[in-house]
Amino acid sequence: MNKKAFIFDLDGVIVDTAKYHFLAWQKIAAELGIEFTPEHNEHLKGVSRVRSLDLILELGKIEASQADKDRWLVQKNEDYLSYLVHMNYSEILPGVMPVLQYLKEQNQAIALGSASKNARPILEKTGIMEYFDVIIDGNDVSNAKPDPEVFLQAARKLGIANDQSIVFEDSVAGVQAANIAGMTSVGIGEHNILHEAQYTFKDFTYMDLSFIESLIKK
Ligand code: B16
Ligand code: MG
């Protein structure tokens, strides 16, 4: 039987928390007098919290002390967490559950590969922790996407080769990380943004289970 590793990014793939990250960063940017648009935000998707702040400061050409940076990082996370308080199963993006259920039925290996340090509480709140054989998140890695570390760790822990691994990603950095790792990259979002992915789907409702079946048999 073919056993593949299916590695899911979290924010923007399983749950729509990307919008909460955006709102929290936008608040910090506004306080600093920096215009921060959804287009700018695309560069922050999949990128670590620390690196995201640096990108915003670069955008505003602001040099800040480490103490200020630390304060903004705490403020951003507190604001972000306030959006998650009422999070539940209903915030799982459409089409995700049928794919997870199908993979389980087919006895495939499933991992989470997220840059977020808040990944575990989100999986708990949405009640889908049990689907994941392995969870690698922002607490486990030292190199942020597009470095492939998060996906390499996931595949290694599952005991499955990189070329037998498939990554679902909504970020440019994450798609690049999957490609560098020698894995199959499936972009979830707009094709014009995620054009480096081997396949792209607007969201999981556009993905037929026969596509997953073909990846398993590949
Ligand atoms: P946190 P993913 C990423 O999660 C987000 O896309 C990115 O916007 C965020 O800055 C990063 O996690 C760190 O998140 O501040 O919660 O540690 O898309 O890799 O699941
Ligand atoms: Mg993401």
Image (cartoon, rainbow, N blue to C red):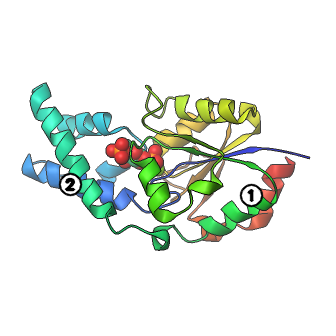
Q: Residues within 10 Å of mark 1 (few under 14, many from 20)?
A: many
Residue 29 falls left or right of residue 172: left
* Residue at image coords 10%, 33%: 68
Q: Is residue 63 above or below residue 198?
A: above
Q: What residue sits right under mark 2 in the picture?
A: 26
The mark total stands at 2
Q: Residues within 10 Å of mark 2 (few under 14, many from 20)?
A: many
Does the residue at mark 2 contact the one at mark 1 (Cβ under 8 Å)? no
Q: Amino acid at mark 1?
A: Leu
The percent coordinates of residue 62 (x first, y second) are: 11, 34
Q: Which label's residue is closer to the chain start, 2 or 1?
A: 2
Decide if ligand 1 comes within 8 Å of the CB at mark 1: no
Q: Is residue 67 above or below residue 125?
A: above
Provide the secondary structure element on which disc 1 rests.
helix
The percent coordinates of residue 20 (x first, y second) are: 31, 59
The residue lying toward the viewer, choosing from 68 and 157, is 157
Residue 211 falls left or right of residue 52: right
* Residue at image coords 39%, 47%: 118
Q: Amino acid at mark 2?
A: Gln
The residue lying toward the viewer, choosing from 215 and 160, is 160
Residue 16 falls left or right of residue 81: right
Q: Work out whether residue 37 can be spotted.
A: no
Q: Is residue 216 above or below residue 20?
A: above
Q: What residue sits right under mark 1 in the picture?
A: 103
Q: CA distance from mark 2 to mark 1?
A: 37 Å
* Residue at image coords 39%, 42%: 117
Instruction: Name the residue furthest right.
Output: 1
